[in-house]
Image: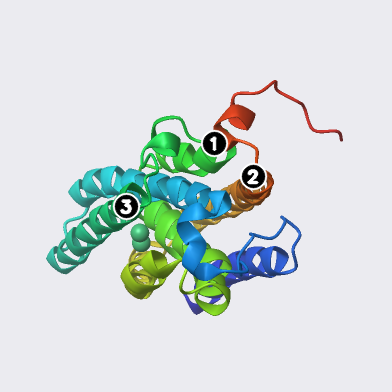
């Protein structure tokens, strides 16, 4: 088990290192004047983008909880459902306070940002789902988004730093404990490893899109218009 957990940590660590090295761009954290957060379009965009994962998590977890028969785990996931609903609410409340549309990228998301969640929607076994969403996904979000917010722009991203970040280690631990409980056979390890690799890749692609859209928002473009623009295929 130690060996498999280590492999899962390596999948996450490789992505964390690539993101930290700027391979998928850099989020525009660390603005000149943090008290002007409500006037920074890239900050508004980033919070609007943030509503999406929190709200979808509430839906996913509500379904996944039915697949578990361990009362202690059901309690912990019940707590997580509350946390993710609270995260959705605090982000939406902050956006409404700033006079911004809280549901703009919830109703019509950035496709690359939504892709990882569409993938996770198909995961049927709890080990696959929690291995991906909690252990890899939330682990990556903490390392590549929330910790940098705390370090570089804590005042601007106060809603994340104060109300969301403190809950995340608990969610990542749920992922770790479910991996330990279920990934005891070669077959299950193979299945979870495969999903984790896909999810880590999609997370990085979502982050890449988020950085690009945020930078364009900062330059005065409307991210919604860019999303709706012509499809330009990447060059290979
Ligand atoms: Fe959350
Ligand atoms: Fe979470």
Q: Mark 2 and 1 residues: CB-CB less than 8 Å, in contact?
A: yes
Q: Residue furthest right?
A: 236
Q: Earlier in the sequence, mark 3 or mark 1?
A: 3
**Which corner quadrant holds the C terminus?**
top right
In space, the residues marked 3 and 1 are separated at their CA atoms by 23 Å
Task: Classify mark 2 as within 8 Å of ligand 1 or not, answering yes or no.
Answer: no
* Element carrying mark 2: helix
Residue at 50% of width from left, 39% of height from top?
114
Residue at 28% of width from left, 52% of height from top?
93
State the image coordinates of residue 144 (x, y, percent, origin top left): 58, 66
Q: Quadrant of ligand 1?
A: bottom left
Which residue is denoted by mark 3 in the rendering?
97
Q: Nearer the viewer, residue 67 or 90?
A: 90
Q: Earlier in the sequence, mark 2 or mark 3?
A: 3
Which residue is denoted by mark 1 in the rendering?
110
State the image coordinates of residue 21 (x, y, percent, origin top left): 75, 68
């Amino acid at each position: 088990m130690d060996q498999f957990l280590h492999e899962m940590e390596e999948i996450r660590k490789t992505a964390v290192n690539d993101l930290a090295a700027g391979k998928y761009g850099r989020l525009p954290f660390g603005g000149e004047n943090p008290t002007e957060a409500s006037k920074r379009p890239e900050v508004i965009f980033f919070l609007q983008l943030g509503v999406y994962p929190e709200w979808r998590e509430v839906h996913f977890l509500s379904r996944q909880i039915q697949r578990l028969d361990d009362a202690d785990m059901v309690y912990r996931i019940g707590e997580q459902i509350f946390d993710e609903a609270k995260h959705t609410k605090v982000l939406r409340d902050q956006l409404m306070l700033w006079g911004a549309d809280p549901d703009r990228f919830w109703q019509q998301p950035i496709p690359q940002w939504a892709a990882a969640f569409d993938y996770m929607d198909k995961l049927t076994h709890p080990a696959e789902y929690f291995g991906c969403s909690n252990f890899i996904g939330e682990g990556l979000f903490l390392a590549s988004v929330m910790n940098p917010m705390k370090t570089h722009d804590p005042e601007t991203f106060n809603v994340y730093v104060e109300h969301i970040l403190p809950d995340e280690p608990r969610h990542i631990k749920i992922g770790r404990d479910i991996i330990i409980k279920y990934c005891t056979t070669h077959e299950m390890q193979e299945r979870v490893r495969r999903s984790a690799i896909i999810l880590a890749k999609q997370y990085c692609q979502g982050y890449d899109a988020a950085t690009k859209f945020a930078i364009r928002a900062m330059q005065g473009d409307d991210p919604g218009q860019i999303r709706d623009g012509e499809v330009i295929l990447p060059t290979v």
